[in-house]
Amino acid sequence: MPSDFSQLLKNLQLKATPQRLAILDIMRAAPTYLSPEEVQSQLQLRADNKVGLPTIYRNLEELSNQGVLSKILHPNRQLYYYYCANREHHHHFVCLACRTVQDIHDCGCAELASQIDGQVELQIMQALGTCRRCCSQNA
Amino acid sequence: MPSDFSQLLKNLQLKATPQRLAILDIMRAAPTYLSPEEVQSQLQLRADNKVGLPTIYRNLEELSNQGVLSKILHPNRQLYYYYCANREHHHHFVCLACRTVQDIHDCGCAELASQIDGQVELQIMQALGTCRRCCSQNA
DNA sequence: TATTTAGATGAAAATCATTTCTATTTAACG
DNA sequence: CGTTAAATAGAAATGATTTTCATCTAAATA
């Protein structure tokens, strides 16, 4: 759980640019998943330097590839990202109403891979729906 | 397993247009998943009438919503569709090399839903990789 | 069989998230 | 401090997907 993102980036052999650090800061503080444009808006609110959208796209993708962020394929076909401190293999349940994210611990991926006649290289698994809190509010 | 797609479409309250029937025919015959553009190419090869891309997009999406086709979210971010006669709840393992699809029967979705603090409305689950045949060919 | 109409199609244009290009800047190492 | 590979910004391009809208047609009904 490094609040020291500089060290994290060094470990990943990425330069600790102000933009990267600011993006990481936003992502860690966000209670929900964010789209690249939303990350940009939040950066502007903080009166940080303006960060270009291509930079945000590049960094979100890179950090996602490195496992620092999780990527969410929304049904609306946009990409969203989420900072998850949990470094173990797991998946997420995403509330489409309030955008909060729950960890799914027992995902059964290992069992699944074992029944496949081939080699699983990428497993996309997402549960989307309405969390209990939002369910009860709409009732 | 209706080879009689007219009846299937009637059940779904969709008109049995020549375009729809042709698309279904292509999809059923395809040994792999197809992109909308690939469906269009195949339609042209058959010297059927030309079918517009928007029509293909609309129909693939509609038939996918109705459960007649399965949708594949490819890592390259394009959509692909696949005709699967298996009407039970299941998921797919997709070979990225040869594009063939295997059914995954024991997906653990029910167990997963039970551990979530909320209501799962949509579960995206895909295993992507290399099937055994392609694995051995590349060795 | 003719009429009617909701649903479907096609062509062109629009949309819009994402990526590329390229000149400029900068973090980090020595 | 100088060097250099990596990173950034802004503008432009990309390209899959969707919308628009005028036209057509399947199929229910008379």
Image (tube, coloured by chain):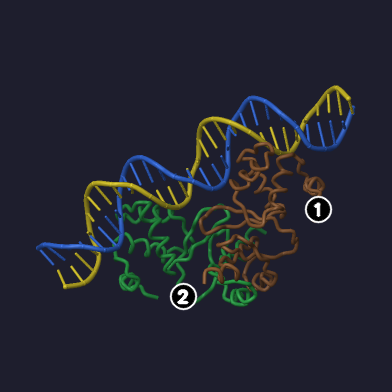
Chain colours: A green, B brown, C yellow, D blue
Which residue appears at 64% of the width and 46% of the height?
Answer: B42
Q: Position of residue B98 (x, y in %)?
A: 58, 61
Tell which of D17 and B104 is nearer to you.
B104
Left or right relative to A83: residue C23: left
Q: Which residue is mark 2?
A: A87
Residue A74 spot, x, y in % from top left: 55, 57
Location of mark 1 (residue): B2
* Residue A92 visible to the viewer: no
Q: Quadrant of residue D13?
A: top left
Residue A24 pos. (x, y %): 37, 64
Q: Amino acid at mark 1?
A: Pro
Side of B46 where D28 appears, left or right: right
Q: Amino acid at mark 2?
A: Arg
**In the displayed structure, does residue A40 sit left or right of residue A16?**
right
Q: Is residue C5 left or right of residue B37?
A: right
* Label 1: which secondary element: loop
**Residue drawn at x 38%, y 51% as measured from the top left:** A53
Residue A77 higher or lower than C28, as above or below: above
